[in-house]
Image (cartoon, helix red, strand yellow):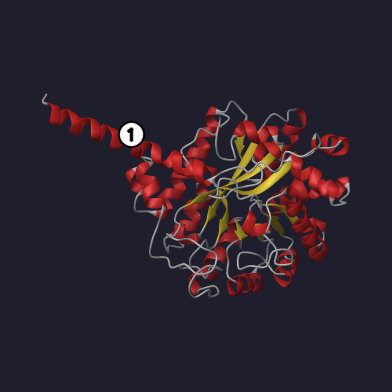
Amino acid sequence: MHRLPLLLLGFALLLISAAAAAPSIIGRLMNRTLHGASGPVGKRARALQETLAVADLHADALLWNRDLLSRGSWGHVDVPRLVEGRVALQVFTTVTKTPRGMNIESNAGDSDNVTLLAVLGRWPRRTWSSFLERSLYQAAKLRTFAAMSGGRLTVVRTRGELAEYIAGRMADDSVTAGILGIEGAQALEDELANVNRLFLAGFRLIGLTHFFDNEVGGSAHGLAKGGLTPFGRQVVERMEELGIVVDLAHASPALIDDVLAMATRPVIVSHTGVTGTCDNARNLDDDRLAAVAATGGVVGIGLWDTALCGTAPADWARAVHHAVDVVGVQHVGLGSDWDGAVAAMIDASQTIHLTQALVDEGFTDGDIRLIMGGNVLRVFSLTLPD
């Protein structure tokens, strides 16, 4: 070949390689772990940690092209790190769309970052133009990891499966489990029948909105920030009939109020902060904290700066303490937002620093067991289908 075609070929191969590497580069940059959680851990926290079944309500690890069965060099969640952090149950949430210029105040829904990620990540072509297919593809990834894990990872879909898994984990705690969730009901593509389709695919939690308003209702970060639409009411009713938990993270105040006015089962807010310690549009006020708790639900406190106005375990424990003061210890849990394009204070292997922070905050061992996992496990044991 002549020199010019060779140069062009080399340049083309370089572009292809760069495109293939782009999702990993983006993921590495967006999902950093801060290293402020390397402080001392006392004997009480170490002993208590060995007895915990940690449960976390939100991680977006399925969005990224990583082998979750191997310990990764970036990101926050994989099976080895979950086991090391004594995470007995992790909600794996599928992300289908995020707007460009994403912020917590006001976003339109007319742009999408995930399409490019799907194309560069070589997701199946059917996912390039379908939010539903993106969720189904990510769910299939989790099932594949579980099938290849040799029993280290279980996907839980029913109360019986959860009870069987927890009983087995008491004999062998070198395992973990996942529950499938969705971040944003745009994945329904405005079709009520898709609630059933997602249920059959194993989804047991649906966040109604993400960073923009959709056909179900308003986002706290959308333009209209409205309440439930008529379609949204149908969706919530069908979710409750099937045993899919309603997640109000990112929901507008009006949407939260509308859902709580009709809810007959526990609802959750999977990952949030509280305005009592960090007052912004991302976080939950005391009245709505109390209303969520009144359903028997749980509020998951996140591990990133916008949720806490801080990046240390002590900041997380302070937010937890405020929520407990408002609603009681039975309604507060962990909602990390690991791998959610945030700089988290710790990764999944480092939950002992949260345990130490709760000890420092003055919680009893029994309270800490509830906050670190017991409350979440209780809600799923009540809400999962038979």
329 left or right, relative to 241: right
Q: Can residue 316 be seen in this view?
A: yes
Please tell me which residue is depicted at 54% across the width and 45% down the height of the picture.
31
254 left or right, relative to 29: right
**Pointer 1: residues within 10 angstroms few (<14), some, or many (20+)?**
few
Please tell me which residue is depicted at 72% across the width and 32% down the height of the picture.
168
- In the picture of the structure, the residue carrying the numbered disc 1 is 17
Is 72 rendered above or below residue 182?
A: above
Is 59 rendered above or below residue 272?
A: above
Three-letter code for the amino acid on which mark 1 is drawn? Ser
Q: Residue 124, percent across and down?
A: 35, 42
Q: Can residue 272 be seen in this view?
A: no
Q: Residue 18, percent across and down?
A: 34, 37
Which image quadrant is residue 169 in?
top right
Q: Residue 214, percent across and down?
A: 46, 67
State the residue lying farthest toward the top: 1
Q: Which of 102 and 200 is in front in this view?
A: 102
Is 283 rendered above or below residue 316?
A: below
Which image quadrant is residue 47 in?
top right
State the residue lying farthest toward the front: 3
Find numbered disc 1 in the image and state the secondary structure of the residue it sits on. helix
Quadrant where the N terminus lies? top left
Q: Which of 264 and 207 is in front in this view?
A: 207
